[in-house]
Amino acid sequence: MSASPAIVVCGPTFLDVVMAGLSTPPQLGKEMWVDQSTITAGGAANQASAIGRLGFECELVTKLGSDKAGQVVSSVLEENNVKTTYVTHVDEQSVTVSLAWDGDRAMVTHGSDEGGDLPADFVPAVLVADLKAIATNEDVVRNWRKKGTKVIGDVGWDDSGAWRIEDLEPLALCDYFVPNETELLHYARTYDLHQAVSTITELIDTDATIILTRGARGVVVLNDGYWSLPALEVDVVDTTGAGDAFSAGLAVGLAMGAQTKAAISLALIIAGLSLGKPGGAGATPTVESLPILMKDLEIPKSYDLDAVEKLLRK
């Protein structure tokens, strides 16, 4: 059996072209200039890069293009010490253009939303994957969980508009589910948050802890009742990849053996610190910069900093 990486990330990867600082949405026939932009790795590569920057061994299982766009993504992964042993190479890299304004973003994507095939020859501490990748790799994921792997599942925007509840069935193999508020409300077909959670848990067989991300309003957690934690109050430049940064922080916390609240507190800090620059992979803190950046933060008293302290002692 191969040596096990601490964390495995599986899902689709994109080359992200990010424009930040728009004052209004773009208009047909007009050109807009912005003061910040970047080209970086997105999707699963963003999660893996954020984990690598925090000093954790991470294996990314995905599809990478052999074209120039794919070479850019590969270079970002290499810079952030992400392993790509099990990557499948395809001709064309998937690409996302992200436009950030007014504390949010809009995206246009070309390519595929497919991840990769998980290997069975090791058992990681934590798996981060979208539900489609979990369904595709059901047997491996089921075996990993039996051997102690914690599974974090997420979803993306359903461009078809179907939002089929059946697509959430892989939650049966998850320990944590991290959707954003809009995604969960669409799946449950309701505008009421509590009703949405009730609907999902009634229709889907799962014991997963649901961590609902709500942007500047923090998170709501369903785990033997409802509880919440606020987001950091930070200046927002670009929210592209903030959800990925949150999942990365959560995975690192769990890989260190932290309890749920402590892992979520770390995730909120990592996600909050990613908002100050365009892009995701290069905007998240490194383990070296984290203590310096935290000096300027007002950490909510409700946070459990056990995972943060463990990380800084690592």
Image (cartoon, rainbow, N blue to C red):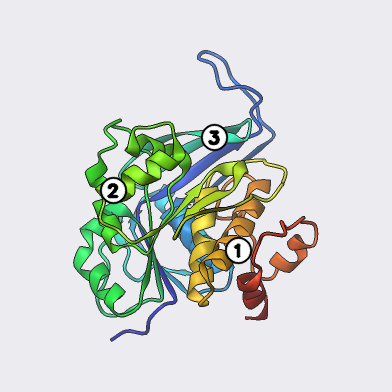
Tell me the CA gap for discs 1 and 3. Answer: 24 Å
Type of amino acid at the residue the image marks with label 1:
Leu
Label 3 environment density (alpha carbons within 10 Å; few <14, some 14–19, many ≥20): some
1 or 3: tag closer to the N-terminus: 3
> SS at mark 2?
helix
Determine the residue located farthest toward the left in the rendered image: 139
Q: Which residue is mark 2?
A: 202
Q: How many numbered marks appear?
A: 3
3 or 2: tag closer to the N-terminus: 3
Tell me the CA gap for discs 3 and 2. Answer: 32 Å
Type of amino acid at the residue the image marks with label 2:
Glu
Q: Which residue is mark 3?
A: 105
Label 2 environment density (alpha carbons within 10 Å; few <14, some 14–19, many ≥20): few
Q: Which residue is mark 1?
A: 266
- For the residue pair 162 and 97, the one nearer the viewer reads as 162
Q: Which mark is residue 106?
A: none
User: Residue 302, relative to residue 38: is it above or below?
Assistant: below
> SS at mark 1?
helix
Q: Residue at x 49, y 71 (%)?
A: 254
Residue 301 in the image, given as x and y percentages of width and height: 72, 59
Quarter assignment of residue 294: bottom right
- For the residue pair 296 and 216, the one nearer the viewer reads as 216
Residue 15 in the image, given as x and y percentages of width and height: 45, 47
Q: Residue at x 33, y 78 (%)?
A: 123
Which quadrant is the N terminus positioned in? bottom left
Label 3 vs label 2, nearer the camera? 2
Q: Residue at x 74, y 60 (%)?
A: 293
Label 1 environment density (alpha carbons within 10 Å; few <14, some 14–19, many ≥20): many
> SS at mark 3?
strand
The reply to whether dot 1 and dot 3 touch (C-beta < 8 Å) is: no
Label 2 vs label 1, nearer the camera? 2
Tell me the CA gap for discs 2 and 1. Answer: 30 Å
